[in-house]
Amino acid sequence: MKKLTPLALFLVLALFAFSCASSGQGSTASTNNKEKDYSQYTSLVQVLRSVPGIQVGGTNSNPNIILRGGGGGGIANVQPLFVIDGVIVGTSYAQANGAVAPDNIKSVRALTGLSATNRYGQEGRGGVILITTKSAN
């Protein structure tokens, strides 16, 4: 059996990683396809607590948000990246909370692992919280 050259091995691993990331295997947690009514919530932290795959600790004004599988590669205190209607808001919960009202949220999805880093690079290493609003174009 022939040995794979380093380039061939890299290509095989890259194709495997790409196929796993594009198929979303084990890398996303989301709400059901049905739209959930978030109008009963008064803050974004309450909405996030209701989404599978998102763990929220701390207080409502200073939450600690961790995505299951969003590790951050062993780096402490890596917060998830917030993306609202395709626009990167950043890793600040306060900015995301100020940018969207719970009653205008259509869906929330957590993106982790290779799917997050392939799509958003180093910014997505702690996972990505994708928020779609009802008023999105």
Image (cartoon, helix red, strand yellow):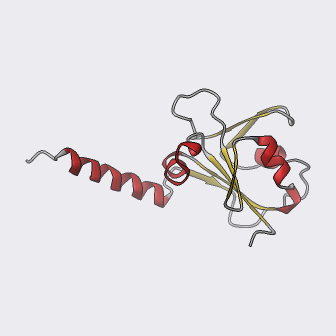
For the residue pair 104 and 123, the one nearer the viewer reads as 123
Q: Residue at x 91, y 49 (%)?
A: 42
Residue 135 percent location from the top left of the image: 81, 69
Count numbered badges in the picture: 0
For the residue pair 18 and 98, the one nearer the viewer reads as 98
Q: Residue furthest left?
A: 1
For the residue pair 130 and 38, the one nearer the viewer reads as 130
Q: Give the answer, above or below, for where 4 lies relative to 62.
A: below
Left or right, residue 95 beside residue 116:
right
Residue 40 percent location from the top left of the image: 91, 55
Q: Give the answer, above or below, for where 43 lies relative to 75.
A: below
For the residue pair 30 and 103, the one nearer the viewer reads as 103
Residue 137 percent location from the top left of the image: 74, 73
Q: Give the answer, above or below, for where 74 lies relative to 10.
A: above
Residue 33 percent location from the top left of the image: 68, 66
Q: Residue furthest bottom?
A: 137
Q: Residue at x 69, y 46 (%)?
A: 90
Q: Residue at x 56, y 35 (%)?
A: 72
Q: Give the answer, above or below, for where 83 lies relative to 125.
A: below
The quadrant in which residue 106 appears is: bottom right
